[in-house]
Image (spheres, rainbow, N blue to C red):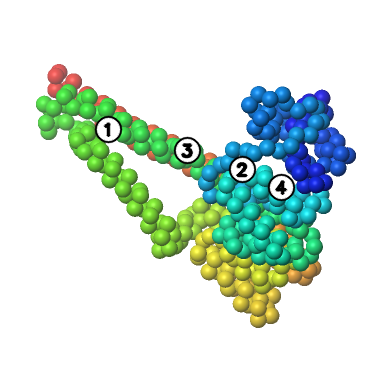
Amino acid sequence: MADFAWHAINAAGEQVRGTFQAPNAAAVQKHLRAQKLTPVRIVDAVDAAALMPAATKAGAKPAAVGALVKTKARKSQKGPAKSSDVLAMTSELSIMLKAGLALDNALRVLIDMAFKDSMRELLTGVLEAVKGGVPLSKALMVHQELFGDFYINMVRSGEASGQMSAVLQRLVEHLERQRALKESVVSATIYPMILVAVAILSLIAMLGFVVPQFEKLFTDMGDALPTPTKIVMTIGQVFRKNGWVILLGGAAVVYLMRSWLSSPTGRLWWQSVLLRMPILGRLALKYQLTLYSRSLGTLLGNGVPLLTALHIATDTVSNRLIQQELAKIPPIVKEGGKMVQAMNTTTVFEPLAVNLVRVGEETGRLGSMMLELSNILNREVEIGIKRALTMIEPVLILVLGIMIASIIVSILMGILSVNDLAA
């Protein structure tokens, strides 16, 4: 038996909290539902402080086992609303609607639960619009930059079908998979970036502190000094005299490069270069197609018309060159052509993708086939990242070793030349 802290919603839409001793979280959930409470969060008692009100954290007596605790004001967090806030909001809204809570009551609970002022203001505006008779999808369109066309159209499909809770749950699954894919890509770049940073710091340390220590030893040798040693000593002198200028110049170059790459022209150039890279190009293409196929499959699975879904899914792709290829598909479909025919006019789809779409069109299961395609591409991206890392890491380590070894060998050559002259 273990202690669990829980957070739930009662029939009146009020937030209640407490603790309960049970063998697992599933037993706690069963206990709460028996009391006609809708579980929102269930965590181990070790993490109970994250769920308990401020008064309890300050030293007040904690709630008894199974007791109800009314929610109190929390310390607000600053900053704009992010995709992670949207994911958390969607998950909680889905749970409350599934429990039978009315939309306006659910929104009130979300406002009370919001940690960020920006999310509280956003939800307050949405609640006022919904109370005025505006559909949720239209209320969210005011914040289209945050939610996006995909999210809003999914909500609209839930309103049309009357299955808002189920649609929101699918949205949560989609957003979680999308976030997991992005995080895996970001995580894969951390170690190579660390190696590059170590290489730069090692060179700075060698040229700025180690090489100058041998300068006096080699001063009187003149032309007798070996060429590699002369080169290293010259670089060391330049770095020592103009080190700050070089560092500031390098920082300026990086800043200007990033600014240019963030511009439409620079971004298009980098996306073009990335797609032409031997290994990373295929990974980048598959990553973008994973986003496209998952978005398209999710939209079609929720009753969004094919033509609308194609336009929205195309907008989820960030690479302009791939987006231009995918933009060829909707006009052909609009004219009555099949999607598989439209895909064959592009240069981004492999035979497997085309065959899956063909099967989906013939069986009337295009949405599920696109989701299956996204799963296949997702696995290929993950495997490709791991393989790329196994190749990149040794190369970076080898380059780092060669650079440092070159400096050390050149210094040793100079020392040996001094010994030869002394003999």
Dot in front, 4 or 3: 4
Which residue is label 3 attached to? Answer: 394
Q: Against 202, is 120 above or below? A: below
Q: Earlier in the sequence, mark 2 or mark 4?
A: 4
Q: Against 258, is 154 above or below? A: below
Q: CA distance from mark 2 to mark 3?
A: 44 Å
Q: Position of residue 225 (x, y in %)?
A: 16, 31
Amino acid identity at mark 2: Phe
Which residue is label 1 attached to? Answer: 207
Q: Position of residue 1 (x, y in %)?
A: 82, 25
Q: CA distance from mark 4 to mark 3?
A: 52 Å
Q: Mark 3 and mark 2 in contact (Cβ < 8 Å)?
A: no
Q: Bin the neighbour count of mark 2 within 10 Å (Cα to Cα): few under 14, some 14-19, many 20 and up.
A: some
Q: Residue furthest bottom?
A: 335
Q: Earlier in the sequence, mark 2 or mark 3?
A: 2
Q: CA distance from mark 2 to mark 4?
A: 12 Å
Amino acid identity at mark 1: Leu
Q: Is residue 152 visible?
A: no
Q: CA distance from mark 1 to mark 4?
A: 60 Å
The residue that appears at 41% across and 39% down in the rendered structure is 196
> Residue 5 versus residue 255: which sits nearer the camera?
5
The answer to whether residue 415 is left or right of residue 309 is left
Amino acid identity at mark 3: Pro
